[in-house]
Amino acid sequence: MTTQSLTEWLQQSRLLVVAVDPAVSRIRVRGVEEVCTDLSCSDQTLVVSDEGAGRDLGALNPGDIVRVESEAGRATRIVVVRRVWEELTSPEW
């Protein structure tokens, strides 16, 4: 059994939004392994960010870093951890 640090867990649980397609209720995300995955959503999927919470996938942007909670193969809650524009203005750049 391997022990995982909090930092490693946080990095692995975060996903980068690659594309958002609200018309078909789907987002494409990329994880730490650099593999893209399409996630099916529904009109009940909740998007949570600093701006508020709602059921509009259009609130997501390519480049946003998110955490996804899912149930039965569908995203039920998407939490925006960091916006793309925050990433581009961070001190690491």
Image (spheres, rainbow, N blue to C red):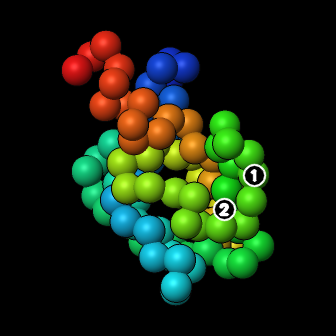
Query: In the figure, is residue 49 to the left or right of 14?
Result: right
Q: Secondary structure at mark 1?
A: strand
Task: Indicate whether 40 appears above or below 75.
Answer: below
Residue 58 placed where, x, y %?
A: 55, 66
Viewer-proximal residue, 92 or 41?
92
Dot 2 crowding, Cα within 10 Å, few <14, some 14–19, many 20+: some
Name the residue at 58% across, 67% down. Answer: 57
Residue at (31, 31) in percent of width and height = 88
Viewer can see residue 71: no
Amino acid, disc 1: Ala
Residue 14 vs residue 83, the one in the foreground: 83
Q: Position of residue 26 (x, y in %)?
A: 50, 76
Residue in the image at 39% along x and 37% along y:
85
Of the two numbered discs 1 and 2 on the same chain, state the one appearing first in sequence.
1
> What separation in Å lies between label 1 and label 2 (alpha carbons)?
17 Å
Bin the neighbour count of mark 1 within 10 Å (Cα to Cα): few under 14, some 14-19, many 20 and up.
some
For the point 27% across and 16% down, the residue is 92
Q: Is residue 77 left or right of residue 63?
A: right
The image quarter containing residue 11 is top left
Q: Which residue is mark 2?
A: 70
Residue under numbered circle 1: 53
